[in-house]
Amino acid sequence: MIRTAGEHALLVETGSLAASHRLDAALRADRPEGVVEIVPGPETVLVVAPGADRERLRARLAAVAGQVGGPPGGAAAGPVVTIPVVYDGADLDSVASLAGISAEEVVARHTGRELVVGWLGFAPGFAYLTGLDPVLELPRLDTPRTSVPAGSVAVAGPYSAVYPTASPGGWRLLGRTTTRVWDVSADPPSLFRPGMRVRFERA
Amino acid sequence: MIEVIAPGPYATVQDLGRPGHAHLGVPRSGAADAPSLRLANRLVGNREDAAGVEVTFGQARLRFREGAWAALTGAPAGARMGVPFWVPPGGELRLEAPEWGLRTYVAVRGGIAVEPVLGSRSTDSLSGLGPEPLRAGTLLPVGGFAVEDISVDLAPPPGPAPAVLRVLAGPRDDWFVPGALEALCGGPYAVSQDSNRVGVRLRGPGLARARQGELPSEGMVAGAVQVPPDGQPIVFLADHPPTGGYPVIAVVRQADLPVAAQLRPGDEVRFTTRPGR
């Protein structure tokens, strides 16, 4: 289903993150005229095209979505980026105790799976990394920290993340990386893009 | 160079923002009332996308160290609205509190030339990208972005627009009980004190949901009428988050975004699904 989001945007329901990534990639590879934003989400892709003929765009999006649709799942095909992490985070021990495993096993489980960049939000360059080992799924901290340093590697709910800049935050800190995931002078400014595969490794 | 003597309650540098980065979590930002900034730029012979100053609630004082042509548009904060005028070297531009409206735009021939971030000089109040909001003592360099001679003598500014926002239903109107869209359009709503460049927060008829649970995060547009669980709508402006998890019952038409951007706390506003006024 393709929903209307005002005069200049359409919201394509994809039904799954993997399908959102496929549609996002197809639209970036062959961008319809007038499209200025393509914003994938867990079950949707927003396409913003001021001035474009909305009904023509709707037909085009339906056609592309049909080509790249199909069942959810399937291996992510994006490039892989490796993030070296020093696992000395302030919440490493409490995550271990809440998960009922050792700190060593927290690290093993965090580094043991390839994650996929779902989408970005909350702050510029803040990527929700999906595919976290379910043993590490924990709610956010009851009281968010007023400042979390840039480069902090954290988990919350079914996601992991690397804080792109210093900001307040309620995610549980496992460690830190020196890899810069956000740099406004770079093009693109974000290391993480939707659909990209990510592997954490012990530094 | 322009020296900020006083910024008034809140003032920022704004151009037309940084589109194209929403998928990286970057708000578009830019002038909340973009047509007013474009007009101010045209009046002084600038490119329409040159950076100017967005002054909230007037009362700003700017000293021009060198002489320059300037123009004011948007909320009327002085006698010389919508007409290019010369500020002599050392001259001071004083804005009054506007009679109506919220945001006044100051364009200077040549444009404000602070360092761009991701292609824009706009202050993004949500993410912190771009220059800091103006303070007493802030120095604003003037650039060389004028592209043509000053040829427009006068562009009479629009008067106060009726505070009616025309909307298109959706994309998530089906998350609400039958009659919710009619309740939105029944109004009126009062503009809340905690409105800002991110959004206009409203108080009025509650919009009840038909569905519980959370909407998976999805892309948001300017003008989106987002409804948090308390049922009180928020109209997104330039610094809105690129994604959000509350359902959007309707989206304000592009032509009425400037009306939304000029609403001030305490104003009343109505919504309509009719396309004409």
Image (spheres, rainbow, N blue to C red):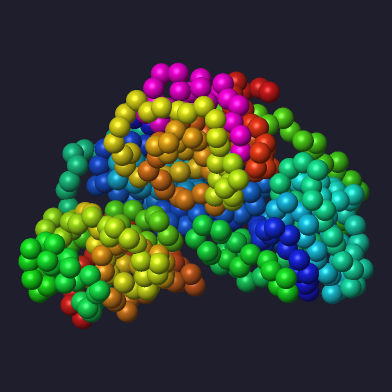
Of A17 and B73, nearer the camera is: B73
In the picture as drawn, the residue positioned furthest to the front comes out as A143
Residue A196 visible in the snapshot: no
Point out residue A164 in the picture as x, y percentages from the top left corner: 38, 68
Of B98 and B155, nearer the camera is: B98
Q: Is residue A144 above or below residue A48?
A: below
Badge count: 0
Q: Is residue B162 above or below residue A30?
A: above
**Residue B133 part of the magenta segment:** no
Q: Is residue A3 above or below residue B75?
A: above
Specify the quadrant of the image occupied by residue A88: bottom left
- Judge left or right: residue B124 versus residue B65: left
Which residue is pictured at 91% across the width and 62% down the height?
B86
Which residue is pictured at 11% across the width and 61% down the height?
A99
Specify the quadrant of the image occupied by residue A2: top left
- Judge left or right: residue B45 versus residue B185: right
Point out residue A178 in the picture as x, y percentages from the top left corner: 32, 79
Of A23 and A120, nearer the camera is: A120
Specify the quadrant of the image occupied by residue B260: top right
Which residue is pictured at 47% across the width and 51% down the height?
B241
**Residue B184 part of the magenta segment:** yes
Q: Quadrant of the N terminus of chain B?
A: bottom right
- Judge left or right: residue A62 versus residue B197: left
Give the residues in magenta: B169-191
- Judge left or right: residue A21 versus residue A112: right
Which residue is pictured at 61% across the width and 60% down the height?
B122
Residue B155 visible in the snapshot: yes
Of B41 and B268, nearer the camera is: B268
Q: Quadrant of the C terminus of chain B?
A: top right
Point out residue B18 in the picture as x, y percentages from the top left corner: 55, 57
Point out residue A198 in the picture as x, y percentages from the top left corner: 24, 65
